[in-house]
Amino acid sequence: MGIILAFILFSTIFQIAFLLEIPNLAFVLEALFCILILRLAFTKKAEIKLILSTVKHFFFHHKIICSIIFVCWVYLFFLATIIPPSNWDSMTYNLSRVLLFQQENSLLLDNVTTPRQAMFVMGSDILTHAFLRFYSDYGVGLFSFLAYVSIALGTYALSRNFASVNISLLTAIIIMGMPELCFQATSTKNDIFTGAAAIFCLQVAYRFLQVLNIQDLSLLILGASFGASAKTTFLVFLLPFSLCLLYLIFKKYKVLDLLNLLRTNWLYFIILIFPSLIMSQFWLFFHNVVTQNDATGLTQNNFVKPTRMKGMFANLVRYLFQSFHLFPFDYIAKGRLNINIDNYLENLYQLIFEPYFGNTKMGYANGKPYGFSIRLFPHEDYSWYGIGGFFLVFPSLVISLIKGNDFLRATSVSLISFMLIVCYLVLWTPWNNRYFNLFFTASGVCIAFLLTLIINLKRNSVIKKSMLWLFLFILISSCILNSSKPLGGLSITEFFKPNIWVKTNFGQDRLYHVNNYYNDDRVTIFKTLVPDNSKVALIGGDNSWIYHFYLTNPKVKFEPITLSEFKDNYATYDYLFCLDVQCDLSDLNTFYEILWSSSNESRKLGKIISLSHN
């Protein structure tokens, strides 16, 4: 829980500083809170020693398992903090928007290359300002890694209320070894924060239902606010979760007791109002409505289109097919034995369901609907949640709904509702896997309940040990075979050939991914040709990788605009940078010089143009 509270604190500080247009205020606030936290820690030395002693005892009691987990976590930590980021969405908006905030000293952006930079919620994206304010991206993946750790520890903590130490530990390993979760742990996308926030809310809700207290109620408000600020899809979970929780609260406590709690602790809510309002992003939604007539930006980007119930069931079936994920065994079978399980699944879908569902609820690319395909691959954009995700999550939610107590039923209803609402609202695309991080990771407590029933029924430790080593193997495989940051490949003789550490010179080549993406050195060329303090008109596409240009040129003033806007105001710029688009300047009424242009070998278009106003 402390990890999520740290996220909430940093996110609130950064948002306040930028909303006041005084980004450096963050340093003062961070220093103040560090002093307060250190002072508090000093007064609680005995408690901290007891915690450390408990952790030490736990580690030595499970030393082999904990040693394997520790090694995996250390490796994931280095991947997240040293290897340069490469996530496609981050290059276009998750990280890029933070650099835009820094250039404009504001969170309310007017000039962007894609509406996502200005309109999407930013509660987790803004965390990377901690590193990007120094115009260095070493460490930007730290927060995703910490969210991953929070998910693992939160799963164990919540499971202990329903299962033994050993089963809770096994459950945590099942969750932390889910391939997609491992891949997100070293990335810079925001989906992993929704899972961490959901587990935080479940943990706090459980405690509040045990003892009526203002602290947990306050934490619940903060956790829900952070989850909603991290990604809009969290609201899809928050709605059914809130309804179920309210039912349990009114079932457990008298209304008078609740009112008395609020009346005697009104100061808590006065203090909570400010950070909760900041985290809620209401100010962003208001700005979006005023400027774009769209509160969230989702409608404008064609992500959300409610349809008939047929569309919901069509997507549910598609996701069930995709979630049949046997990593790493399917990946090994495909790479070494030429057995492609994906093709069998896809053919089965096309035979049984394609004639009925057709293109219902399909996303579109270039004006045409996607064709349903299953291309499971160890990459955060295409992977799913592994053996545990398919064979344990779905049954555990059903069993919890049937045999669980009120809290387990509420958790099951909340997660199943989340799944169905996402199927109903969001158009299908091949990379919707990331939306279900919350669904799979927050189901840990239900898995623990299911495993308790199975193992107690069989009374056989062989099942438990077999599962333990199976999921430890999956965890290790997920750490090693991540195709965007691989340690090794499937070849025994050339295992280290795809090694990301060698390819990036142990993280020193910060432009490795962008140079591969464009197949040229345009980032380096731009920095060489365009001097500091220049004003550059940036004309880019909706999916342009602008991140590295902002990162490597902090003293260059970029202004994303359209070609027509540039032609109307060309005299105010020193340079024109066309990125991924064709710039027709035949009717430009001034002298200009093309300093660089993309070649036939380049994968994307590009031009750097110097403007003369003599």
Image (spheres, rainbow, N blue to C red):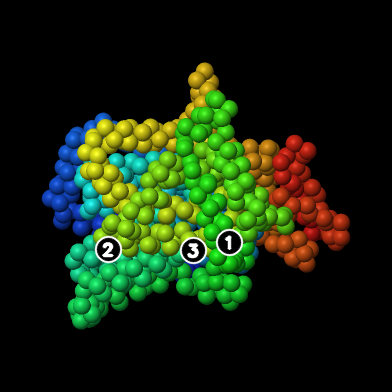
Compared to residue 82, the image places residue 23 above or below, namely below
Disc 3 to disc 2: CB gap under 8 Å: no
Q: Residue at the front extreme?
A: 352
Q: Would you say residue 564 is visible in this rendering?
A: yes
| 1 or 3: tag closer to the N-terminus | 1
Where residue 418 appears, x then y in whole percent? 44, 61
| Residue at figure coordinates x 59%, y 59% from the top left | 427
Measure the alpha-carbon separation of dots 1 and 2. Answer: 31 Å
Where residue 336 appears, x then y in whole percent? 54, 25
Measure the alpha-carbon separation of dots 1 and 3. Answer: 11 Å
| Residue at figure coordinates x 32%, y 58% from the top left | 402
| Residue at figure coordinates x 51%, y 38% from the top left | 378
> The residue under label 2 is which amino acid type?
Asp
Q: Is residue 13 left or right of residue 540?
A: left
Where residue 122 appears, x then y in whole percent? 48, 61
SS of the residue under disc 1: helix
| 1 or 2: tag closer to the N-terminus | 1
Image quarter of the C terminus: bottom right
> The residue under label 1 is which amino acid type?
Gly
Find residue 406 and name its label: 2
Q: Residue under circle 3?
A: 421
Q: Residue under circle 1?
A: 311
